[in-house]
Image: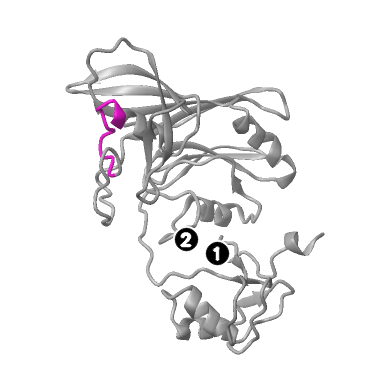
Amino acid sequence: MSKRHAAAPLPMRDGVAPSYLWLPEGQWPDMLTFLIERYPQIGAAQWQDRMARGEVLNGDGAVLAPGSAYRRGMRIFYYRELERETPIPFQEEILFQDEHLVVVDKPHFLPMTPAGRFVQETLLTRLKNQFNSADLTPIHRLDRETAGVVLFSRLPASRGAYQTLFQRREVHKVYEALAPRLEGRDFPFTYRSRMVEAEQFFLMREEAGEANSETIIDVIERRGDMNLYRLQPHTGRKHQLRVHLAALGIPIVNDAFYPLASPCEEDDMSQPLQLLARAIDFTDPLSGEPRHFESRRSL
């Protein structure tokens, strides 16, 4: 096994794998000076405490001290720690599990994986703690704001077979969304556009050019001045369904990003984005059996 793919010298802790960093080109007198400059939001005292606990290591498993020499190309391992993490008061539900898959009904607001201001309050961390498994990995993703069905792989040996289904677009996904009524259209219809990353961090936008995103849009039922829509994406662009409905003038109820991003504030847990990953269908690449998984949630 190559050094680049060697196992991490720190174990999974509370469902979270250690983070790592390849040290870049540059000159720093010692490790502490580099870490303070690289991560200014983490103070010297915090790094010194982590090092004293033996929780900053190099790729060979040697504990690094504040005065350890900085060496370009070395890989270091450490745990991400947050002083305060917003609790997510909603629970996921296991819909199915076997030796290869865990199928989960994700609640709104719960991130898929650790990032930013969330480490423990993520679906992956919760599942790793529940199953006591460091090998669990999401096969595809849902936005933090979106609820519904999502698949996780349990075994590295079979993971690629399931990932290939998504890469080849051999997975049929159905979403539901609550949004204003759209007049002047015959349903169902297909909406296509070219989506690219927006200038504003994390967002997407449409531009002129060859379409790279496609969604079939239909109406399930009318609810006053709203419709409950059935959305079937044929492509998997980030925020695709949210961008498409906003572009049609019918942004999804409680969407804080589209058509205009709201100022970054604490989540209003009483106002979830009205978007649900309702169902997933595919032919199991290992058994050849048809698979159908459906959310038990509703909008």
Residue 17 spot, x, y in % from top left? 60, 62
Q: Categorize mark 2 by other alpha carbons within 10 Å: few (<14), some (14-19), many (20+).
A: many
Question: Helix, strand or loop at disc 1?
Answer: loop
Q: Categorize mark 1 by other alpha carbons within 10 Å: few (<14), some (14-19), many (20+).
A: few
- Quadrant of the snapshot with the N terminus: bottom right
Q: Main secondary structure of the magenta part?
A: loop
Residue 206 seen by the camera: yes
Q: Nearer the viewer, residue 57 or 289?
A: 57
Query: What residue is drawn where x is 38% and y is 22%?
Result: 230
- Asked if the residues shown at circle 1 and circle 2 are in contact, with their CB atoms under 8 angstroms apart, the answer is yes
Residue 99 seen by the camera: no
Q: Quadrant of residue 15?
A: bottom right
Q: Look at label 1 and name its amino acid.
A: Asp
Q: Label 1 belongs to which residue?
A: 14
Q: Is residue 37 left or right of residue 162?
A: left
Q: Label 2 belongs to which residue?
A: 120
Query: What residue is drawn where x is 33% and y is 17%?
Result: 220
Q: Nearer the viewer, residue 160 or 23?
A: 23
Q: CA distance from mark 1 to mark 2?
A: 8 Å
Residue 83 spot, x, y in % from top left? 40, 72
Q: Is residue 251 magenta?
A: yes
Q: Look at label 2 and name its amino acid.
A: Gln
- In the rendered image of this protein, does residue 249 appear above or below residue 38? above
Q: Residue furthest front?
A: 209
Question: Helix, strand or loop at disc 2?
Answer: loop
Of labels 1 and 2, earlier in sequence is 1
Q: Which residues are magenta?
A: 246-256
